[in-house]
Amino acid sequence: MPAVTFELLKTDDRTKARRGRLITPHGVIETPIFMPVGTAATVKGMKPEDVKELGAQIILSNTYHLYLRPGHDVVREAGGLHKFMNWDLPILTDSGGFQVFSLGAMRKIREEGVDFRSHIDGSKHFISPEKSIEIQHSLGSDIMMAFDECAPYPADRRYVKDSLELTTRWLARCKKYHEEYCEQHGGESQILGEGVNQSLFGIMQGGVYKDLRKQSAEQVVEMDLPGYSIGGLSVGEPKDIMYDVMDECVDYLPKDKPRYLMGVGSPDCLFEGVERGVDMFDCVLPTRIARHGMAMTSQGKVNIKNAKYERDFEPLDPNCDCYTCRNYSKAYLRHLFKSNELMSATLMSYHNLHFLVSTMTKIREAIEEGRFLEYKKEFFDAYGEF
């Protein structure tokens, strides 16, 4: 049995929306789910206890960043990522592929892997599919992502086809390395959650070319993994194109395995993704915009920098029961932001994460009650323009 398994509990009668349950060594995850991002073993500006309190069931960490600093050997020596960062719920680690490929001229892709220079100090490094899994073994995450190449948008068909085929070959190497490691060392390091306590998810690529998406999915699914993700979307393409491609992507993936849309987390994208059968989402958006004074609320966006909030002593969202909204006014939050106080980012991040996590809870309830489309309309009518 894989370390991570999935139960499909209910499907919506009018859409592809699904209600499921992901079982991991560190707990059960109710899906569909939004996963906060903790790039460097921390959700920016938040204590782990606060992230758990607002209802997050799983967080992400970044293989590339933790490899460079503090080093995966340091994390392993600390007892694994869960212990290192004081988080006892599930963790998903990405492979580092997207970050490496985002380096542009500072990296070179070849069959063996990727040569690149650190964005921190310019030092030279090399990550292969095997190295990515080795790093993730040391981190001890519940879910590991395969090392892939994320083609940019726009990209010509020939490049995208070559890229997805390279991703497939790299996935086979990731799987082989993981399985051989488990056979050789599976029983030796279980205290770290290492090896046998981890599951590898594959990544579908193919850009905006639907036939290439199908080709990639067929190759990835053939490897019979515990879960699959849709990569290479939300990389600059218009949303209508993303939705059109996504609409077919899920049809190429097994119904009895979780489907993960990587790097997507705005409220409209969450609803549209769920409607198309996606189970898992992640994005840095809620904490990133919080640091710039922007909040997502049930009544739409709130830019706390605006002068009209100087004497507004109401909460960010009158319909929200999060810690921030229970205790602080827009006037106070604006004061903190204008004063460059760190508390501004913390309180705004708490609210934004709570907003997305609670929205996903309501989506799950709506699917269970057969009223997903009604809830979606209610939400969009109240939220306004995205």
Image: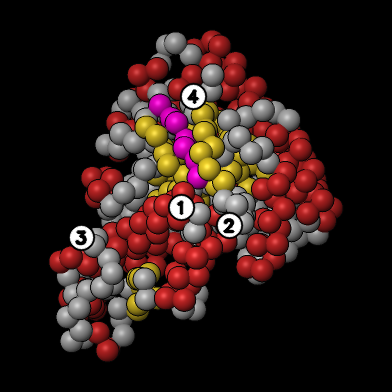
- Please provide percent x and percent y for residue 213: 75, 49
- Please provide percent x and percent y for residue 109: 69, 44
Which quarter of the image is occupied by the N terminus? Answer: top right
Q: Is residue 209 left or right of residue 327?
A: right
Pointer 2: residues within 10 angstroms few (<14), some, or many (20+)? many
Q: Which residues are magenta?
A: 19-25
Pointer 1: residues within 10 angstroms few (<14), some, or many (20+)? few
Mark sitting earlier along the chain (2/1): 2
Q: Which residue is mark 1?
A: 369
**Amino acid beneath label 3:** Tyr
Report if residue 229 lies within the magenta region: no
Residue 277 appears in the picture as rendered: yes
Q: Say what secondary structure mark 1 lies in.
A: loop
**Which residue is depicted at the point 35% across and 56% down?**
358
Q: Which residue is mark 2?
A: 275
Q: Which residue is mark 3?
A: 323
State how far apart marks 4 and 2 are (Cα). Answer: 28 Å
Q: Nearer the viewer, mark 2 or mark 1?
A: 1
Q: Nearer the viewer, mark 1 or mark 3?
A: 1
Work out whether 382 lies above or below 167: below
- Please provide percent x and percent y for residue 230: 63, 48
Q: Nearer the viewer, mark 1 or mark 4?
A: 1
Q: Residue 225 is drawn in which quadrant?
A: top right
State how far apart marks 3 and 4 are (Cα). Answer: 35 Å
Q: Are marks 2 and 1 in contact (CB under 8 Å)?
A: no
User: Foreground residue, 256 or 46?
Assistant: 256
Q: Say what secondary structure mark 4 lies in.
A: loop
Mark sitting earlier along the chain (1/4): 4
Q: How many marks?
A: 4
Report if residue 24 lies within the magenta region: yes
Q: Residue 382 is drawn in which quadrant?
A: bottom left
- Please identify the dominant SS of the magenta region: strand
